[in-house]
Amino acid sequence: MTITLHAELGNLQPLDLDAGSVFNGTPSGRTVSGYSGPCSYTPSPDPDYIFHETSRDVIVWLMNSSDPLYVFGPTGSGKTSLIKQLAARLNYPVFEVTGHSRLEFPDLVGHLSVRDGNMEFQYGPLALAMRFGGLFLLNEIDLLEPATATLELPL
Ligand SMILES: Nc1ncnc2c1ncn2[C@@H]1O[C@H](COP(=O)(O)OP(=O)(O)O)[C@@H](O)[C@H]1O
Ligand SMILES: [Mg+2]
C-alpha cells in the first residue's frame, strides 16, 4: 500500500497549464503550474464551483509558496473548498487533516511502524505533501494545541 502510493505520487508529471482554460474555459495565455493528470489524492472537481476574483491571490501564493497560507473566515465561507477546487483543476494531490486538541506533530509528519516484521517509517500527510509536491491542508488549525501548531508553522 505504502509502496504503491509512493510510486503513484512519484509519477506525477509537473506541467504548465493555461490559467484561463483551467478556471473559466477561455485560454488566457497565462500559465500556472500543475500536474499532467490527477492521482488518488487529487480532489474531484465540483462542476458548480465558482472561482471568485480572490482565488487569484491564492493561485499567486501557490505558484510562489515559500510560506504557509493561512485562510480565515466564518464556517461555510468557502476556505476549504477554494483550496480543494484549485487543487482539483491543477491536479495537485491534497493531504487533508482536521485539527483537534489531541492531534500531535507525529500524526502529521509520520511515525515508525512494523510491516512484515520490519520497522518502516510511515509518512504522515505533511511529509507526503512535502516529499511529493502536494498540498497539506490543515482545517480548523485553531483547534490544535498551541505546541503542535507552532511546530507546524515554520516550514
Ligand atoms: N465559490 C464557490 N462556489 C460554489 N460553492 C461554494 C463556493 N465556495 C463554497 N462553496 C460551497 O459552500 C460550502 C461550504 O464551503 P467550505 O469550503 O466547506 O467552507 P469553510 O471551509 O470556510 O467552512 C461547500 O459545500 C462548498 O462547496
Ligand atoms: Mg473548512
Image (spheres, grey):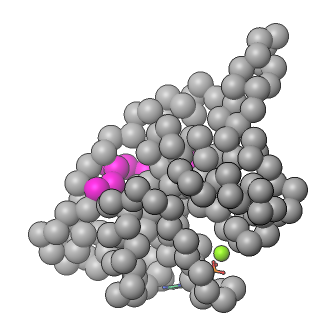
In which quarter of the view is residue 52 placed?
bottom left
Q: Is residue 39 visible in this depiction of the protein?
A: no
Magenta segment: 33-41
Single out the residue that lies furthest toward the right. 102
Single out the residue that lies furthest toward the top. 117
| Picture quarter with the N terminus | top right
The answer to whether 145 is drawn above or below residue 114 in the figure is below
The answer to whether 67 is drawn above or below residue 116 in the figure is below
For residue 6, side relative to residue 76 (left or right): left
The answer to whether 23 is drawn above or below residue 127 in the figure is below
Give the quarter the ligand 2 occupies.
bottom right
Residue shown at the point (59%, 40%) measured from the top left: 127
Residue shown at the point (56%, 54%) measured from the top left: 154
Residue shown at the point (46%, 60%) measured from the top left: 67
The image shows residue 86 at horizontal and vertical percentages of 43, 68
For residue 106, side relative to residue 42 (left or right): right
The image shows residue 35 at horizontal and vertical percentages of 34, 50
Residue 36 sits inside the magenta stretch: yes
Residue shown at the point (67%, 52%) measured from the top left: 151
The image shows residue 141 at horizontal and vertical percentages of 70, 68
> In this orientation, which residue lies closer to the viewer: 69 or 51?
69
In which quarter of the view is residue 51 placed?
bottom left
Q: Is residue 50 visible in this depiction of the protein?
A: yes
For residue 100, side relative to residue 58 (left or right): right
